[in-house]
């Protein structure tokens, strides 16, 4: 009995020693980004990460980068070391953004295991992106509008999975994507996007 | 030194001397000397243990008739026969001739009659010790069933069972365990339902019990469990309710009543029985099924909830819904301790409070509740020592564990294990430990019957009384005997 | 629990089904090919059919002698059994290594890249050794719970992806090269390992009927077909960007506001691989003739762990270990060739 107990204790202690909790993410320390927007200003692309917080104000971090992948890297390196995209739900791209950048970003989203295929992707005008930066409720409103659009028009692609597949589809050269506009209030429409094969 | 099987002497003086010596001249050893009416003025003595016999019964039913009867010129053996057959008004008279039996009978509340000139003695039933009356069992409270529970005296418990099964099939078999305590046990079973193999095995295991004193049914648990399958779950069922015991007897199980314990041991005992209660069979099937499922879910919540919460907070915050994530992160961020330690500490403090609540005198019970609720609950959270979400989780798990209170010991151990594993390895660790626990439960047997029977090995027919309680038409179609469960071992 | 206690054939088949579910949820070949759903469906059906054929020699031996092949071999060639035992022991070590490496690859890529994979493998193997100590009856009973959980998980994952089905971009075409066909068929054929397991433990079962295997195989076909269907018509090209597509499928499952069932995937994959490696280790013990010998289980588990470490550190070892063609060839030898040799040699004296 004593020998068995000793073996058990040694086993548990070894496990504790060898593993530790060094790879834990820790809910209280993580900076969780729920929404990301990308816009182009003065020839530069700006990615803004909107973080989950309980405060009244919108918490965000903006970085200059050429792609979402490098933006994540730069944000982690310089501003938010505990950045977590595991709750990333909404991606707004400026309607004037180069299609190649959007394609690259979608490629990145599709290749990362921790990113959900159901991340909502939509184009947005400048006012909408400004609205997102000012109101904490804005992302939820945008998501609701996207769902309504999808219910009305089933062919519109609203998540990264369907947008990605439409871009790389061998069967069609254009697809329909959502576009958010803001003038006094949010509205959403479907926009046809042509894809060069 | 009194040896088993030592025969009594013919001399009354010698017998009394030996018995007095074996009781070390104990103050409660009482001898009532008398001279019987006979030509030779035969001497006799009545031995009782103070407090065990009813003085009234002894005086009226034993001493009075003895002193009034004229034994003429009968020999001592003839006197014994005469007393046994014609003199005494007592309903229970047993003849014996060994020292050990003299001790056992006198300490069981019998009056022992010794006549000079013969080694034969009579034990006359005259029990009159005080005992607690039949009352509602505290640990198995039901809404619609009987309010009777077992008490300490063996004979009363036997009566409670006999009243419910008025069949000659019901057998009570006496066994004595404990070399010093000579505790009486009663094996109860239905002759036509029980498995002879299981019965023989129980007898064998009780015979192998080498304890000197057996003061409660729990002492026997280790001897009755299957040694080849050790587990934190128990293969022995305990019940304080005679109606529950009767139901189990009809399924081929054996109940063991222990003198001095207000509970019966029921074996074989299965995991699914922990979720069954008498109320299930009194209520309507749909409600009983709902309560059953609730019990299973509560068990799972009691075991897994704190561990999963710890794992999610440490390793998988993305699994929390967004609103809950914010609140949990906020509450955890203000506390000084890591989540794992916090949950462990709270669970430990809760266990201390629960144990204190059990042991504390009833008059101080309110103080414990106030201390627990205000100091630990309110103040600790306000002071930022613990987070409110942790407290919620621990409290919810604690309440869930009371739904199946018989499983409380394994639930507690598993809960701690899952918290530690969840804190170190996350959800992966919880899954692996669950697999290990499942293997342990699936390998366990209770007298050769797989502990997880009905679930694994799976039996669709037997599922009518597991997660759901089928209606009585289905249940009464045929009774499932426990020895007929698949993969039951032959010993 | 007594070692000679018979277990229900249905219980064993349920464990085989869990085994098959592990094969499909750990599949990682899709990204490498440009094949269509129809082609893969044909591969599934063919693969499972061939796997069923691998059972035939063991079924013949069992029906004639009431023994499994391993007991039969011990009986007929007591002196030469060392060679057979050695081969089967090594085969099972290889098979266990295959599943362990595949699982840890998935764990490393999908669940926790920063986690210490050696500790994960060690603990998994330790849990399996404990399971072996408790015996195959306990393992197959545990398999019933894992089966119930897998049904729930698959139902939730599939039904949560119904809304994501995309018939606009993807349809029922047939395309794929010959090499893709062979590779995919080989992959689905890996479930034939259960034929070798059957050859080792079928003697312990009671109430065995051939239809049990048929039903298990049919259920496997349905499961594989459903999984492939959802992978192709939900993930499409998106799935090609990632390995272990079933993980991505679980992540894309959605019920109302509840997004992602990857926690179910983690639980299912871990418990299935635990069951697989436990059963395989029992078979190793059976092959060596020491059924409930814990020391044997420890030694061979250590061997599997060493093999795993080599695979992690040397790519060449890893390539050999996770090569489905090698596994299938070895399975063919273990399930068909050797039992057929025994049947041929002892065909007149089978019933002696």
Image (spheres, coloured by chain):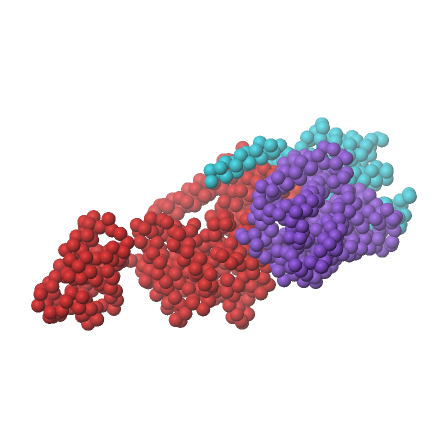
Residue most extreme to the right: A197
Q: Is residue B203 above or below residue A121?
A: below
Colour assigned to chain C in the rendering is: purple
Residue most extreme to the top: A78
Query: How many numbered marks does the figure carry?
Result: 0
Q: In this view of the protein, can residue B380 be seen by the observer?
A: no
Say whether residue B127 is left or right of residue B324. Answer: left
Residue at image position (40%, 67%) is: B170
Rendered location of residue A150, percent (x, y): 78, 52
Q: In this view of the protein, can residue C97 be seen by the observer?
A: yes
Say whether residue B130 is left or right of residue A58. Answer: left
> Among the chains, which one is red?
B
Rendered location of residue B298, percent (x, y): 53, 53
Rendered location of residue B433, percent (x, y): 58, 44
Residue at image position (9%, 64%) is: B41
Q: Is residue B173 above or below residue B305?
A: below
Rendered location of residue A30, percent (x, y): 65, 35
Residue at image position (45%, 54%) is: B236
- Return the residue nearer the eye: C99 or B272: C99
Residue at image position (52%, 57%) is: B489
Q: Is residue B164 above or below residue C295?
A: below
* Quadrant of image for the C terminus of chain C: bottom right
> Among the chains, which one is cyan?
A
């Amino acid at each position: 009995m004593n020998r068995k107990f000793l073996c058990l204790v040694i086993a548990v202690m070894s496990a504790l020693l060898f593993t530790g909790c060094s790879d834990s993410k820790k809910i209280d320390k993580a900076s969780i980004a729920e929404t990301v927007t990308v816009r182009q200003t003065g020839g530069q692309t700006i990615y803004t990460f909107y973080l989950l917080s309980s405060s009244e104000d919108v918490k965000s971090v903006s970085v200059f980068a050429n792609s979402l992948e490098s933006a994540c890297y730069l944000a982690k390196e310089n501003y938010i070391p505990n950045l977590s995209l595991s709750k990333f739900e909404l991606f707004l791209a400026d309607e004037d953004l180069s299609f190649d950048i959007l394609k690259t970003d979608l490629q990145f989203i599709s290749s990362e295991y921790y990113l959900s295929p159901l991340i909502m992707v939509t184009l947005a005008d400048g006012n909408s992106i400004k609205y997102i930066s000012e109101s904490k409720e804005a992302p939820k409103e945008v998501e609701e509008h996207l769902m309504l659009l999808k219910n009305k028009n089933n062919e519109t692609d609203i998540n990264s999975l369907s947008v990605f597949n439409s871009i790389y589809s061998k069967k069609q050269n254009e697809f329909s994507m959502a576009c958010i506009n803001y003038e006094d209030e949010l509205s959403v429409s479907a926009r046809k996007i042509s894809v060069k094969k | 030194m009194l040896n088993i099987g030592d025969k009594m002497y013919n001399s009354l003086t010698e017998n009394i001397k030996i018995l007095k010596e074996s009781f070390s001249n104990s103050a409660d050893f009482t001898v009532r000397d008398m001279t019987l009416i006979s030509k030779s003025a035969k001497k006799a003595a009545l031995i009782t243990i103070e407090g065990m016999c009813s003085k009234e019964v002894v005086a009226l039913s034993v001493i009075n008739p003895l002193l009034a009867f004229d034994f003429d010129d009968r020999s001592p053996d003839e006197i014994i026969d005469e007393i046994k057959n014609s003199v005494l008004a007592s309903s229970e008279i047993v003849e014996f001739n060994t020292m050990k039996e003299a001790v056992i009978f006198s300490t069981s509340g019998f009056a022992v009659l010794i006549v000079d000139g013969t080694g034969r003695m009579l034990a006359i039933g005259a029990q009159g010790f005080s005992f607690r009356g039949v009352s509602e069992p505290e640990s198995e409270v039901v809404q619609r069933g009987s309010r009777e529970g077992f008490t300490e005296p063996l004979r009363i418990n036997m009566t409670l069972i006999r009243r419910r099964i008025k069949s000659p099939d019901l057998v009570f078999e006496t066994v004595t365990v404990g070399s010093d305590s000579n505790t009486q046990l009663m094996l109860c079973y239905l002759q036509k339902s029980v498995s002879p193999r299981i019965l023989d095995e129980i007898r064998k295991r009780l015979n192998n019990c080498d304890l000197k004193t057996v003061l409660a049914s729990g002492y026997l648990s280790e001897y009755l469990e299957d040694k080849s399958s050790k587990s934190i779950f128990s293969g022995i069922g305990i019940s304080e309710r005679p109606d529950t015991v009767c139901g189990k007897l009809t399924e081929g199980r054996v109940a063991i009543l222990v003198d001095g314990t207000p509970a019966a041991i029921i074996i074989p005992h299965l995991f699914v029985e922990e979720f069954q209660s008498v109320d299930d069979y009194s209520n309507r099937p749909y409600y009983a099924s709902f309560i059953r499922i609730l019990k299973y879910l509560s068990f799972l919540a009691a075991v897994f909830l704190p561990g999963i919460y710890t794992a999610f907070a440490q390793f998988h915050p993305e699994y929390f819904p967004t609103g809950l994530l914010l609140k949990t992160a906020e509450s955890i961020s203000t506390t000084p301790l890591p989540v794992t330690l916090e949950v462990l500490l709270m669970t430990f403090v809760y266990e201390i409070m629960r144990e204190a609540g059990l042991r504390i005198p009833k008059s101080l019970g309110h103080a414990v509740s106030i201390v627990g609720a205000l100091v630990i609950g309110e103040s600790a959270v306000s002071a930022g020592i613990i987070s409110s979400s942790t407290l919620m989780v621990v409290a919810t798990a604690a309440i869930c564990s009371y739904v199946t209170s018989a499983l409380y010991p394994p639930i507690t151990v598993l809960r701690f294990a899952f918290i530690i594993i969840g804190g170190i390895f996350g959800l992966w660790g919880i899954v692996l430990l669950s697999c290990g626990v499942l293997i342990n439960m699936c390998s366990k047997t209770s007298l050769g019957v797989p502990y997880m029977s009905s679930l694994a090995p799976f039996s669709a027919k037997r599922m009518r009384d597991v997660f759901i309680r089928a209606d009585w038409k289905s249940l009464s179609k045929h009774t499932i005997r426990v020895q007929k469960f698949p993969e039951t071992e032959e010993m | 629990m007594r070692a000679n206690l018979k277990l229900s054939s249905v219980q064993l088949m349920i464990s085989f089904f869990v085994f098959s579910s592990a094969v499909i949820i750990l599949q990682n070949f899709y990204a490498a090919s440009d094949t269509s759903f129809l082609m893969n469906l044909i591969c599934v059906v063919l693969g499972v059919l061939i796997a069923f054929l691998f059972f035939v020699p063991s079924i013949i031996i069992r029906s004639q002698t009431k023994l499994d092949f391993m007991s039969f071999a011990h009986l007929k060639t007591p002196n030469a059994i060392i060679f057979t035992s050695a081969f089967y022991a090594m085969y099972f070590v290889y098979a266990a290594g295959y599943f362990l490496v595949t699982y840890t690859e998935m764990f490393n890529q999908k669940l926790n890249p920063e986690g210490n994979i050696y500790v994960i493998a060690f603990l998994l193997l330790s849990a399996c050794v404990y399971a072996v100590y408790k015996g195959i009856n306990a393992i197959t009973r545990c398999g019933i719970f894992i089966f119930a959980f897998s049904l729930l998980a698959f139902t939730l994952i599939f039904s949560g992806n119904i809304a994501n089905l995309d018939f606009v971009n993807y349809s029922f075409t047939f395309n794929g090269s010959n090499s893709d066909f062979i590779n995919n068929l080989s992959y689905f054929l890996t479930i034939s390992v259960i034929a070798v397991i059957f050859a080792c433990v079928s003697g312990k079962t009671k109430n065995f009927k051939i239809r049990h295997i048929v039903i298990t195989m049919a259920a496997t076909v349905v499961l594989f077909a459903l999984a492939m269907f959802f992978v192709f018509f939900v993930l499409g090209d998106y799935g090609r960007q990632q390995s272990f597509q079933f993980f991505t499928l679980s992540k894309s499952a959605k019920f109302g506001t509840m997004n992602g069932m990857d926690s179910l995937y983690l639980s299912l994959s871990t418990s299935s691989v635990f069951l697989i490696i436990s059963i395989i280790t029992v078979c190793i013990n059976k092959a060596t003739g020491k059924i409930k010998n814990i020391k044997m289980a420890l030694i061979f588990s250590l061997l599997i762990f060493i093999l795993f470490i080599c695979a992690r550190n040397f790519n060449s070892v890893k390539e050999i270990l996770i090569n489905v063609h090698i596994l299938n060839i070895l399975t063919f030898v273990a399930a068909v060739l050797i039992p057929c040799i025994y049947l041929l040699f002892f065909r007149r004296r089978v019933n002696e």
